[in-house]
Image (cartoon, rainbow, N blue to C red):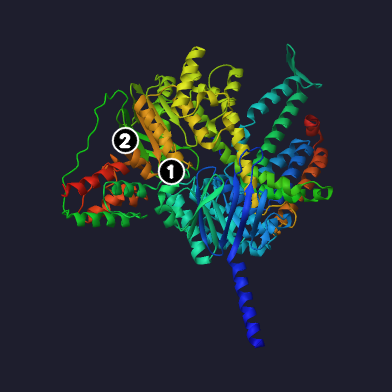
Amino acid sequence: MLKFVVLANRFWYNIFLKMEENSVIVCENVKFTYQGAETAAVNGVSFSVKRGEFLSVIGHNGSGKSTLARLINGLSEADEGKITVLGMDVNEGKNCIEIRKRVGIVFQNPDNQTVASIVEDDVAFGPENIGVERGEIGERIDWALKSVGMEEYRYATPSRLSGGQKQRIAVAGVLAIKPEIIILDESTAMLDPKGRREVIEVVKRLNKEDGMTVILITHFMDEALLADRTIVMNRGEIVLQGTPEDIFKNGEKLETFNLSLPRISLISNNLRAAGMDVANVLHAKELAEQILKNFDKQGILRGESSKFAEQRAETSHEWDIDIKDLTFTYSKKSPFAANALKGVDLHIDDGEFFGIIGHTGSGKSTLIQHLNALIKLPQAQRKFRKKRVKNGLPQPVYPAISVGQFNLADKKCDFKALRASVGLVFQYPEYQLFAETVFQDVAFGLKNFKKGLSQTEIELAVKSSIEIVGLDYEEIKDKSPFDLSGGQKRRVAIAGVIVTKPNVLILDEPAAGLDPKGKNEIMELLHKIHKEWCKTVIIVSHDMDEVAENCSSVAVLSEGKVFACDSPSRLFRRAKELSALGLDVPLTAKLSALLSENGIVINSDCTVNGFSEKVIEVFEGGVNA
Amino acid sequence: MLNDVTFGQYYPAQSFVHKLDPRCKIIALITFIVLLFVANNFYSLAACALIIGASIAAARVPLGRVLKSVKGILFILAFTAVLNLFFHGGEHLLCSWWIIKIYREGIIFTVFFVLRLFFLVMASSVLTLTTTPVSLTDGIESLLKPLKWVKFPVHELALIMSIALRFIPTLIDETNRIIAAQKARGADFESGNIFKRIKAMIPILIPLLISAFRRADELGDAMDARCYSGSKNRTKYKKLKFGVRDAVSLLIVAALIAGVVLLNIYWAQIFPQINDFIKLS
């Protein structure tokens, strides 16, 4: 009897221990308000994280995701409520270092996390801080670099690495402290798809193989889907919790929380509205199967369909852009010389919404800086002298660019007028804001380009430009640009470029770093500008879906050359070639490919709506024509 | 605009000098500089030139790279040399014109002055060419360690230096980006008078400053999250090793000092008449 009691006691005690052990983070009704803010950034949040769990957190910009990460790590102290990490109370100051040893956090900007100029020294920084013995630090560096796959870069300089590599170094720096929990606070937001894949692979492996608890804060649905559980935040509160599948399948709810529907849900919604029987799925393959099932039910024959003729609007060709033999080498005479462009030939028609895609380092940014002569062609430079041709040697080829009537290879070209009519918006343009008020900042370009405008003329132009980017002129004009939210800053920065009403507008990653809803809004805005007065819009992007959804033509840049230039529908049919370059294809193209494997040919323009329409057409037509 | 700035002059090679402990190199450089100013005749100065030549050869750095660093101060060198030449007083007047009087002493002084500065810059560039900025910082930190006794924040200073080194390339990139972006908005940095040009820098400087603060903020968080809490209980992964090589080179340096001092004192007595000619400087 006594034995039984002891056993039973031990049993309950073990269960109790298990529970304690299982929850590594427990938040109870946590509240936090930033100094000077009116509303709480985190407002009564309760949740717990189990050991070894992979948790993803999604939510619009400013929903409190990052604040939550800071609270767990003790970087900020909660105003109310209790956070327990591995049995320690975060609010107690003495636990601070102990908690940070066990909870590693990787931030968004890969540039701002490294302290040393050599990878090895940077990884050593954490272990040094907690007083690890020298010999062991060496071992930890080996191990940490190996688990992020960066062993070869031990003696490299972080500033010469790619974004994905830098971020992996940041992960290694955190791993070297040997944490039990790792938090990624939008760590992939500033990376290109390749960098994102690299980092996510590392995180996945850490969770699956080393059993590390992972909290992944992200805007990307495909990343959130990797988790065991997802938390959706809205205005500082947790509004949804569950498996990522459940959350994204019931996508309608997401819209009410300022998040956008995943594209795949948009397509299935469209199809369902047309009477097709399509369940909510999350992977292209599943959706393709569902569509095929519907077609089979309808008795649609599978076979070759008629070719889809593309239509092109006739344009005046007044602002055509023509690039020939463009080559460019960075830091020519230094040991770090790099060929950014190796002979680019490209023609962009007037009136196009043009997309340029390619890896980081494929020369996209260099190319667009040529278009408004920020990088001048050699012939247009002051010290240019034509090389004498020696006997037997071929005549050197000089690059040529023309934008509308501007000939950029001409020394006498009016570069100022060119820049006024070719607007260029750089990546993260909000970092260029400088003036005291929004009005002054937006007017800066206008005053530079058009001297002698009257005050009313300037006001009028600034007003219309601020309004076209969707901001309230009266409310915002006297504010400091630095007091605005991230999305507003970006709009103001764009307004500062379009204020001269350029005929050609070029944007480098206009939607980078924004949440999905913000991305859509920026794209809508660009279409509005395109429709109203800007003849040609050129966007550089990593996001294939974004390009497919918005562009009428796409050029793929690879290793300094134009790999292909075509309409999205034709281009994305070459999925295999693109993936050989390490590029993805948009969801619609994936679906088309899957369907055509089964004998159904959907020739759409690769937009979500276009694709849905075509599928519905085939479905309703009953014949595959 | 800033594309040509390749930060740090480090010239990668495997040589005796490259492998020396940075502390040893810093001490050697300081002694050498003192030596340059101790040398008071052409023989000891010639000895200094020999030392530099030997160390450049041992470092396996192309002479061109070393001379390139002198190019930077060429203008200042020429300017002060001319001033010295024209206005240095003395006894033996060689020629005079208007307010300019050239004395023999002036010529000698100028030659000494130019050579000393020339050697000084060359020697310093041998140090920077053979030592990475990182190990230079480590060396300085280690040499300053005794100052800890007077509560001087040596560790913090070293950390600040290494973070500054780390962020220079990042901030140069950023500056280039901002310049390009403002140019695209029609900003003009190349025309107008000096005041106009300074004013034109505002759209570059303000975003740069704000970005630097933002980066500092984020870096601070990242350091906090990686358990940084000052120099207390901190270990160091890399420890500088003072090896046989360093001991040998410090001995050589000591021998050189002795040599130059001896030259200073005795050579003068061996050839008194030459010394009379060049004595004073």
Q: Which mark is residue B229?
A: none
Q: Position of residue A419 (x, y in %)?
A: 43, 24
Judged left or right of residue A515, residue B175 is right
Q: The disc labelled 2 sits on which kind of residue?
A: Asp
Chain letter belonging to callout 1: A
Q: The disc labelled 1 sits on which kind of residue?
A: Gly
Q: Residue shown at 81%/38% (left/top)?
A: B268
Q: Residue shown at 53%/66% (left/top)?
A: A210
Q: Which mark is residue A361?
A: 1
Q: Secondary structure at mark 2?
A: strand
Q: Residue shown at 17%/49% (left/top)?
A: A622
Q: Which mark is residue A345?
A: 2
Q: Mark 2 and mark 1, same subunit?
A: yes
Quadrant where the C terminus of chain B sits is top right
- Binning the other alpha carbons within 10 Å of mark 2 as few (below 14), some (14 to 19) or many (20 upward) gives some
Q: Are marks 2 and 1 in contact (CB under 8 Å)?
A: no
